[in-house]
Image (tube, grey):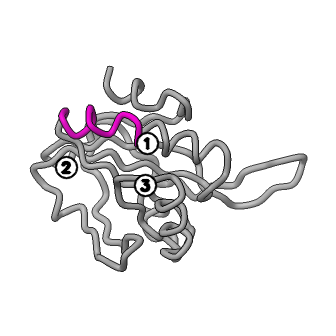
Amino acid sequence: MSLTVGSPAPAFEAKDQNGNTIKLSDLKGKKVILYFYPKDSTPGCTAQACNLRDNYDALIKAGYVVLGVSSDSAKSHQKFIAKENLPFSLLADEDLKVHDAYGTWVEKSMYGRKYMGTARTTFVINEAGILEEIIEKVDTKNHTSQILK
């Protein structure tokens, strides 16, 4: 299933780094940046998270809630948040349910080896729960400018 702009964002429920349950339905009425990234504390993922952190005030001012999603554990997320001083929640999608709902768990290839992993993708969801934008070519160092155009 591939998602398209204008369609309803798939419902999800996942635990954040502190074990709190985050549901898309609880965020109705808010704009949501749901960004999927491969791995905590890796260069590209750190650049992306820090770009969102450095521009967090502008994102909040524009009415956004920022949520990162990876298959890492809550403990890994806690370390990443503490190390990089991230002001937003990271969802621990270890069972890949959120990845599956958004089609971001895909076959990848590196050095000729095929493996399953996260497709770095950002979904911008409007107040009504509709996909407003899908960013598949993420510029990790300038990601906020891709969102706040």
* Magenta stretch: includes residue 60: yes
Displayed quadrant of residue 64: top left
Q: Which mark is residue 68?
A: 3
Tell which tag, 3 or 2, sits nearer the viewer.
Answer: 3
Q: CA distance from mark 3 to mark 1?
A: 9 Å
Looking at numbered disc 2 in the image, what kind of residue is underneath it? Gly
Q: Is residue 144 left or right of residue 63?
A: right
Q: CA distance from mark 3 to mark 2?
A: 17 Å
Span highlighted in magenta in the image: 53-62
Q: Residues within 10 Å of mark 2 (few under 14, many from 20)?
A: many
Q: Is residue 20 left or right of residue 103?
A: left
N-terminal-most mark, 3 or 1: 3
| Vertical placement of residue 145 versus 118, above or below | above
Q: Secondary structure at mark 2?
A: loop
Q: Position of residue 47 (x, y in %)?
A: 57, 40
Task: Specify the farthest residue to the right.
Answer: 112
| Vertical placement of residue 24 versus 51, above or below | below
Q: Residue at x 50, y 66 (%)?
A: 77
Displayed quadrant of residue 52: top left
Looking at numbered disc 3 in the image, what kind of residue is underneath it? Gly
Q: Position of residue 79 (x, y in %)?
A: 54, 67
Q: Quadrant of the C terminus?
A: top left
Q: Which residue is mark 2?
A: 129
Q: Residue at x 69, y 55 (%)?
A: 107
Q: Which residue is mark 1?
A: 122
Identify the main secondary structure in magenta.
Answer: helix
Looking at numbered disc 1 in the image, what kind of residue is underneath it? Thr
Tell which tag, 3 or 1, sits nearer the viewer.
Answer: 3
Task: Specify the farthest residue to the top.
Answer: 149
Q: Position of residue 18 (x, y in %)?
A: 37, 76
- Asked whether the residues under the numbered discs 1 and 2 touch, taking CB atoms below 8 Å apart as contact, a structural biologist would say no
